Amino acid sequence: EKLLDGVQVEWKTLKNLTFPTSNIKWRAAKRTYRYIDLTSVNIETKLITETIEITSSDAPSRAQKIVEKDDVIFATTRPTQKRYCLIGDQYSGEIASTGYCVLRAKQKEVLPKWIGHWIASSKFNKYVEENQSGSAYPAISDAKVKEFEIPIPCPDNPKKSLEIQAEIVRILDAMTDHAAELTAELTAELTARKKQ
C-alpha cells in the first residue's frame, strides 16, 4: 500500500496485458515435446513436477498449447484448486494442455510475476468462483480469465510502473518463501509428534 500511495493506478484486463498465444501444428512437428498435463503442476508448490514425452503420433488431443519462458499458465478446469505456475527455461517451447489458460505478459507493461501474484490472490479466486460454470466438473473459459482486471501502477510511465511491480513482487515473494519455510517446519514437527 505504501508503494502505491499517491501513485496513479489503472485497472487493466489480462487480455490487454497479454499477447495471443498459438497452438502447435502437429502435422509439421518433427521432435518430441514435454507435455504439461493438468496433473503436471503441483497445487502446493506451483511447480511442474512431471511431464511425459509426446510426439505427433501419440499426442493426446488436449496437447495443443505452445508455452514459452515466463508464461503464466492457469488451469481452467476445477479452477478453484488454484493450479497455476510460471514457465521456466526448461519448459520453454514445450506443450501444455488446452485445460490451461496461457498468459503471455506484454513485458514492457507488466511483469509475468505480477500477473502470477494476482492469479494467486483471493480477489482472483472470488472472481473465478463467480464466473465458473458446471457443477460436477466446474470450469472457466480462457476468455473469462482474460476479462479479470489487475492494477497497473503509473500506467503513463512504464519504467516506474515496472519498478513498483518488481518491488511489490520482491516483498510478496519473500513473504511466500517465509510461509513455505514455516509450513515445512510445521509439517516436520507434526510428523515427529505423530511418531512420538
Image: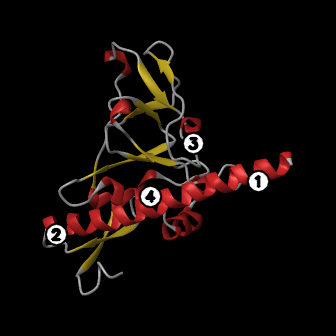
Q: Hey, what amino acid is under mark 3?
A: Asn
Q: Are marks 3 and 2 in contact (CB under 8 Å)?
A: no
- Label 2 vs 4, first from the N-terminus: 4
Classify mark 1: helix, strand or loop: helix
Classify mark 3: helix, strand or loop: loop
Label 2 environment density (alpha carbons within 10 Å; few <14, some 14–19, many ≥20): few
Quick check: can you spot residue 137?
yes
Q: CA distance from mark 2 to mark 1?
A: 45 Å
Farthest residue, direction front: 196
Q: Mark 2 highlights which residue?
A: 160
Q: Is residue 186 left or right of residue 15?
A: right
Toward which corner of the image does residue 148 lie, by quadrant?
A: bottom left
Classify mark 2: helix, strand or loop: helix
Q: Mark 4 highlights which residue?
A: 145
Q: Hey, what amino acid is under mark 4?
A: Val
- Label 1 vs 4, first from the N-terminus: 4
Q: Hey, what amino acid is under mark 2?
A: Lys
- Label 2 vs 1, first from the N-terminus: 2
Q: Are marks 3 and 1 in contact (CB under 8 Å)?
A: no
Label 1 environment density (alpha carbons within 10 Å; few <14, some 14–19, many ≥20): few
Q: Is residue 163 left or right of residue 55?
A: left
Q: CA distance from mark 2 to mark 4?
A: 27 Å
x 59%, y 59%: residue: 182
- Label 3 vs 1, first from the N-terminus: 3
Mark 3 vs mark 1: give the one in front. Answer: 1
Q: Mark 1 highlights which residue?
A: 190
